[in-house]
Amino acid sequence: MNHPMDHLLRTDRLPHIWCPGCGIGTIVSCCIRAIEESGIPEEQFVTVSGIGCTSRAPGYINLDSFHTTHGRAIPFATGLKLANSRLKVFILAGDGDLFAIGGNHIIHAARRNVELVVICVNNFIYGMTGGQVAPTTPVGGITSTSPYGNFEHPFNLVYLTAAAGAVYVARWTTLHVHQLKRAIGEAFNKRGFSFIEVISPCPTEYGRKNRKARGIDIMKYFKEKSVIKRDIDLSTGSFGKLTDIKLDGEIVCGKFVDIERPTYLDKLEELKTVVSISLK
Amino acid sequence: MNTEFLKGEHFVQGNIACAEGAIVAGCRFFAGYPITPSTEIGEHMAERLPKLGGVFVQFEDEIASIAAILGASWAGVKSMTATSGPGFSLMNENIGLGAMMEVPCVVVNIQRGGPSTGLPTMEGQADVMQARWGSHGDYEIIAVSPNSPQEIFDLTIEAFNLSEQYRVPTIVLSDAAVGHMTEKVKFRTPEEVKITPRRYTTLKPGDYLPHKPDSDLVPPIIKAGDGYRIHTTGLTHDERGYPVMKEEAQGRLVRRLVNKIRKNANKIIRVEEIDTHNADVVVISYGITSRIVWSGIELSKRKGIKVGYLRLITIWPFPEAMVRELSNHITGFVVVEMNLGQIFYEVERCSAVKTLLVPHAGGGFHKPEEISQAIEEVAKKRK
């Protein structure tokens, strides 16, 4: 029996490699539904990833898809977008890939306002390599490289990308499938650098070490602790700390930035016009 | 600079000639990070590309730059980056990705003295092995080594052609001396040179597999967004581009990636040969060093020694068969290079006769006497 979304999946590659209870499949599902509902021709979509569990997602999506090196999805995607502005380029990547090894690239892409949609699967841990500490692991979180509890201050991803210049910033959990799908759709229609953080369960590596061994326990935690706040405007920079995530603490969800400013390609077109005028 | 392409002869720096060569070859995307002594290439592209409808981006680092040119190339635009030693080290992981994904692109390394920060403003030739195997794993690339501003112009075009022909990252392995040297360059327009077009598939979506080779072991390519819906990855993959974690898949893929260069080596390799067939001693060199060895050869010729000259224009693939053949009827080789033995080992492994290295650590040039002494020492073996 066929699933209605089969045409956007590489069904010949199934079953996928993700663990039971993992949130990535839900996020893939939200992505392909958002693509279908966007009205944009499917062929225009290109998806790029780096390394890690999430980075396998483009391999299951039936679009032009590129599985690149660790942390480098954003510059690879930037090359694709700037070489062909018609493409709708989106990145599926984990928190470690985007904010540890790739940290420099994401802040610069946001600063340049390159038209990319970055969907970050934040499960607070390195899943594929076996559960090491991430730049997002909350203080106190147990991982295989923070066995006594993480004492490093984690990044607040939405605050960081908003500060770096993203024009669209939102955070949802995998429980918020409708909001997430809508956010991805909004980002696809956004001119500029869009960032969506999806808080996602990793029962195998994060959950087991932090008293939430089953996916359902993590989803219950999302249900109990997530709070949708519509009055936080990170583009002004004044409410950033309200969106910090603490161990077993509140997860503030919502759309935090939705602004307009010229994109990199807008500026490039302007430059080309100026240059061609000066030639005459 | 009002015309699209430079015409006629100009007195220009090697780095500028390199950038202009890229433009003639069709390069319309340049991503880079400034580093001495390659910086003028990026600076020139920043001025030229917007006028040609192209894109110049100065990225946050070299890693982003090489990743971006791989992406741009998949979008169908000929793309290039330029760097020097330390930056080239940073690029190597994604040169491996380019080899694995079979992405045509050009990486220019204007070498300087190393290791580490080394000699930022001074010449070196010690990235020869890094150019070949700087990335992890087994793969083959193509590297060309120009010895003048004219040749960096011509060979940058050639590098694009080879890269498109074999779907492989191709390296212009030059150095600070050539990059910063100003000489007369005869520019050619795209109509006056051979431009190898990208090998796009003629198959329809659904029939096309991104890593299924033609008989020359090279697969045709597609452009992202053209409806082929391909997947490609740095993981070991099958012809569909799907990851396969199996010994057989690894063997099939890696052997083909290596063989598409090795088995086509005769079509790729270019050398300059003078008097090698009558020689007792053959001097092998490449790049800037090849212009120094002449003085040493002259000194030895005056003493009646029959000296031949073999210059590697393509360094990788290495002209193994040619060196083996020469070694059958000469007394020995002298390898002159600005490192402490990189191509020397390649020559030595192909040579049945005495092979002497004239090394130099970089930051200056060999003295002609060092070269002639080595030639004479090898020639003595004849007696």
Image (cartoon, coloured by chain):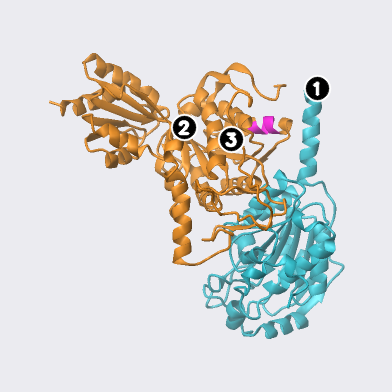
Q: Is residue A109 visible?
A: yes
Q: Disc 2 on helix, strand or loop?
A: strand
Near-viewer residue (B45 or A171): B45
Residue A45: horizontal and vertical position, in percent? 74, 56
Classify 10 Å Cα crowding around label 2: few (below 14), some (14-19), many (20 and above): many
Which amino acid type is marked by label 1?
Lys
- In the image, residue B333 lies at what x, y percent? 26, 31
Q: Decide: is B118 above or below B281.
A: below
Q: Which residue is mark 2?
A: B175
Q: Give the percent coordinates (x, y) of residue B237.
A: 54, 61
Q: Quick check: can you spot residue A254?
A: no
Specify the quadrant of the image occupied by residue B42.
top right
Give how far apart the Cα atoms at labels 2 and 3 are: 26 Å
Chain B shown in which color? Answer: orange
* Relative side of B300 to B48, left or right: left
Local crowd at mark 1 within 10 Å, few (<14), some, or many (≥20)?
few
Q: Nearer the viewer, residue B143 or B259?
A: B259
Range of magenta residues: B45-49
User: What amino acid does circle 2 point to?
Assistant: Asp
State the image quarter where residue B123 is shown. top left
Answer whether labels 2 and 3 touch (C-beta < 8 Å): no
Residue at the location (57% across, 40% down)? Answer: B164
User: Residue A65 appears at what percent x and percent y?
Assistant: 66, 58
Q: Which residue is mark 3?
A: B196
Q: Are marks 1 and 2 in contact (CB under 8 Å)?
A: no
Return the chain for callout 2. B
**Which chain is cyan in the rendering?**
A
Marks 1/3 same chain: no
Name above or below for residue A270 compared with residue A48: above
What residue does disc 1 label? A280
| Disc 1 from disc 2: Cα separation | 37 Å
